[in-house]
Image (cartoon, rainbow, N blue to C red):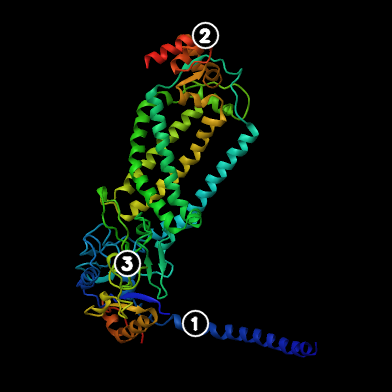
Amino acid sequence: MLKQNMVSPVGDILKFLSILMLLVITVISQPTFAAVEGEPEGVIMKNPGADLWREVRQRNIAIEGISQIKSVDSGILINPEADRWTRFRVDQLVNYAAIILAGLALLLLVFYLLRGKIKVEGGLSRQMLHRFSDYERVLHWTLAIVFLFLAITGLTLLLGRTFLIPLFGQEFFSLLASSSKEGHNLFGPIFFASLIMMILRFVKRNIYEKGDLTWLVKGGGIIGKSHVSGGFFNMGEKTWYWIVILIGLLISVSGLILVSPNFGQGRVIMELSHIVHVISAIILIAVSFGHMYLGSVGTEGALESMKTGYVDVNWAESHHDRWAKECRDNNRVISADKFNRLQGKINSGTEESGSVAVEGNK
Amino acid sequence: MARMKFYCDAERCIECNACVTACKNEHEIPWGVNRRRVVTIKDGQQGERSLSVACMHCSDAPCAAVCPVDCFYTTDDGVVLHDKDICIGCGYCFYACPFGAPQFPENAAFSSRGKMDKCTFCAGGPEDDHSSDEYKKYGRNRLAEGKLPLCAEMCSTKALLAGDANMLSDIYRKRIINRGASVLNWGVNYDKVKLNT
């Protein structure tokens, strides 16, 4: 206490003196500055070294040197895009990809618990309609399996260091990542090929029509309970189709640029391709969660169309009423008995003879 | 502990490519892989300069940050090395490195990448020092022999320096001080300006 009392007057005096000095200095210095302005300027020392490093660093323009080592980009001393790519991968990509995919899976689980399975209106009629041919189903499952394989191997490479190395250890994960890389590179072109076949086979049925807007307005029948209209494919399916095709093409082209570095593409092109590849892949995987959900546990009767190729008439009525009407008009409804016979399945005693016939045919 | 660095003096490098050759020979590096290269900018024009570049052994190495299998490590000497038994040859370090240091031998069709190879600062790899495994995968371990990287040791103009960062700074600072005037005269037109001494 005593000390503080003694110090405070001294502090006040010091404060006052410093303010006074500041004022005096400002007043005195004013004419001095004015005098300097009149004198001729000193030489602006341009350091040749500074120019060199500015060019090496590619500050203003991209400058490529020459090198006796003849290979792509060997004349570039510093690639400024490299750091941007590194920051993207380390700071954003890994975190956001994990959060988006995990969040979406959780959201679907919550949605399933709230909404449950969307039942077919009026129950199953046991009368069937032929929907997808064998070729179409094989094509679908080829693309689906290749897609799943690529998604899993790709995510292993993307998220493995964060989530799998702590689990498996570095050596086992290295083995896993190495096979993931080789498998990813090998099956990528197969994805591209089946995507092209998917375009050729399904593009006609996926062009948007007049009634599709109503489907969108009514929320596709997922959220509400109202009846929504649809043709062979409804608006939601068409949108999924175009997402697969367009984003799939983006992934395929950028992937092909990455997989074969022997066409003279430089690092910057590959960095950009990688960014395109990985962002579109995350989007496609995220949307595929929705497709897989609706195609399996989300909607009653939906999986049947891709399993057997046949769908229940009532399922068709509630999801694709225009297509169902067209089928009825053309007498394409198949009875339950005929369907069972086509599937080689017999479920009642009266069909015993039919069963024998099928067995005999084999 | 020392903090190993390379420094290439652009005012001294004469683009003789001896560092490239010495490196290839010392480590028996396969065809198509070059751990070091000399780049000349403004070739044949005023202000032409050459620089020898290899792995810079960054303190915060981007290759290590992006590696999906985490195969990079920094030694006590500040040398950035990688484990070829862990490396999967994905090429991400090649995208992340600003200097183009990581190299990939072509091991199959479509130039599919083999395990990455890069400058080791002549410090070998994770295997036992001077073992034949280490030599096969990473080349000679000169640091363990008490020697500096060969590229810098045999540089005829002493443009390429290798060693502890503080010592390199001291050497380069002395050069700059001694060279002061000559740098002033180099590439600058003083016709119409007065020197402010």
State whether residue B179 is above or below residue A163. below
**Which of B194 and A176 lies nearest the eye of the viewer?**
A176
Question: How many numbered marks, from 0 up?
Answer: 3
Decide: few, some or many residues near mark 2? Use Cα within 10 Å; few <14, some 14-19, many ≥20. Answer: few
**Which of A61 and A178 lies nearest the eye of the viewer?**
A178
Q: Are marks 3 and 1 in contact (CB under 8 Å)?
A: no
* Residue at left offset 63%, top offset 25%: A225
Q: Position of residue A128 (x, y in %)?
A: 50, 15
In the visual, does B130 lie left or right of A16? left
- CA gap, disc 3 and disc 2: 86 Å
Chain letter for mark 1, please: A
Residue that mark 2 sits on: A350
* Residue at left offset 45%, top offset 51%: A158
* Residue at left offset 43%, top offset 51%: A157
Residue that mark 3 sits on: A56
Q: What kind of residue is marked 1? A: Phe
* Marked residue nearer the N-terminal end (3 or 2): 3
Q: Secondary structure at mark 1?
A: helix
Q: What kind of residue is marked 3? A: Val
**Which of A171 and A209 lies nearest the eye of the viewer?**
A171
- CA gap, disc 3 and disc 1: 39 Å
